Image: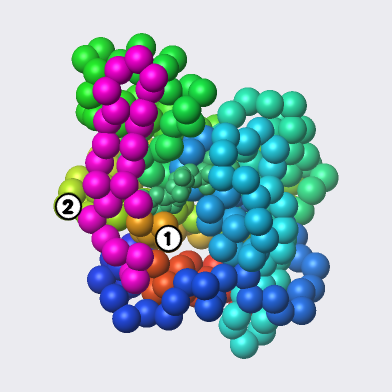
């Protein structure tokens, strides 16, 4: 069973553990190479980071990275630090990209957070984004977000391949996990989502991933996995000031979030070799 299939199963499980019970379990940690979380602005990076680390961080548009440690619950109790890279351009983002994808920093793995077009657009940007949509509807907004996401994924894959090449794989990262987040918003169009992200669909997202896998083959073992996730099922709302809002309802209930999150922990354990 692929990680994707296990993820869909987890999202069908209404009777999983509660997410609060699992969030940020404070176990003694041991220093490990950090894991980076990348992806577009509004994809849910901070939300995931918050649950994994049990720390608080603002939900709003941010240009600052979130940092913290996460404890994995496998037998080996491996721990790692988790750092999110903000989606929007800023000096902090630039510095962190240079540091973590540079030739001196060890990286354990990279998590790329994708949303199939459901990136949250913060209020201060909404008017600008709305003005550029022609026609103004959910389809053009979604396409705009998907295009941005592909750019962002291309950047992550390029940096990752470059780092592994210039260090001959010695400083990692050893894996890339794509999280397709907010699956609660696309639950009724899973076939389309699968075709877009999974290998074999012939879509541009996997073409980028395939190029990465080919480029990095020569530098030792490398894992690439895709996990669907829904940690915070809530309606998607895009609300500019000058025109009517656009919305997409959530199709899942909060009770699936626990098993979805539990599988994320398991997947991280597996990737980190716990
Ligand atoms: N529907 C839904 N919304 C989510 C999910 N995860 C996060 N969000 C929402 O997405 C928005 C952006 O999240 P945030 O973590 O701040 O994004 P970041 O910019 O990538 O750090 C927040 O309002 C979250 O509540 C999810 O699984 N489903
Ligand atoms: Mg954030």
Give the residue at x 79% y 48%: 105
Give the residue at x 62% y 36%: 62
Respond yes or no on whether mark 1 lies under 8 Å from ligand 1.
yes
Give the residue number, with chain letter if any, for mark 1.
Answer: 231
* Region rendered in magenta: 234-256
Give the residue number, with chain letter if any, for mark 2.
Answer: 188
- Classed neighbour count for the residue bearing mark 2: other residues with Cα under 10 Å, few (<14), some (14–19), many (≥20): few
254 on left or right of 193: right
Residue 254 within the segment the image draws in magenta: yes
Residue 133: where, in percent of width, then height? 30, 16
Residue 235, placed above or below residue 32: above
* Number of marks present in the image shown: 2
Q: Secondary structure at mark 1?
A: loop
Give the residue at x 27% y 52%: 250
Sequence-wise, the earlier of marks 1 and 2 is: 2
- Given contact means CB atoms under 8 Å apart, are the residues at marks 1 and 2 in contact? no
On the rendered image, what quadrant is the C terminus found in? bottom right
Residue 46: where, in percent of width, then height? 57, 49
Q: Looking at the image, can residue 149 be seen?
A: yes
């Amino acid at each position: 069973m692929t990680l994707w299939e296990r993820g869909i199963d987890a999202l069908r499980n209404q009777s999983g553990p509660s997410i609060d019970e699992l969030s940020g379990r404070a176990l003694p940690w041991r220093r490990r190479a950090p894991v980076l979380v990348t992806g577009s602005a509004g994809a849910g990076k901070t939300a995931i980071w918050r649950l994994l680390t049990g720390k608080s961080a603002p939900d709003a548009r941010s240009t600052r990275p979130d940092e913290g440690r996460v404890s994995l619950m496998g037998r080996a109790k491996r721990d790692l630090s988790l750092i999110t890279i903000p989606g929007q351009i800023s000096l902090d983002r630039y510095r962190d990209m240079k540091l973590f994808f540079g030739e001196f920093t060890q990286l354990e793995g990279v998590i790329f957070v994708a949303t199939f077009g459901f990136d949250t657009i913060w209020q201060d940007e909404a008017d600008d984004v709305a003005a550029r949509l022609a026609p103004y509807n959910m389809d053009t907004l979604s396409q705009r977000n998907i295009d941005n996401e592909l750019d962002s994924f291309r950047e992550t894959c390029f940096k990752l391949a470059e780092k592994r090449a210039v260090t001959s794989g010695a400083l990692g990262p050893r894996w890339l996990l794509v999280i397709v987040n907010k699956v609660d918003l696309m639950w009724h169009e899973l076939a389309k989502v699968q075709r877009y992200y999974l290998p074999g669909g012939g879509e541009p997202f996997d073409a980028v991933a395939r190029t990465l896998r080919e480029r990095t083959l020569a530098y030792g073992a490398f894992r690439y996995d895709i996990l669907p996730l829904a940690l915070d099922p809530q309606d998607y709302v895009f609300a500019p000031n000058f025109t009517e809002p656009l919305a997409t309802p959530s199709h899942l209930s909060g009770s699936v979030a626990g098993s979805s999150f539990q599988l994320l922990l398991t997947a991280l354990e597996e990737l980190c070799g716990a």
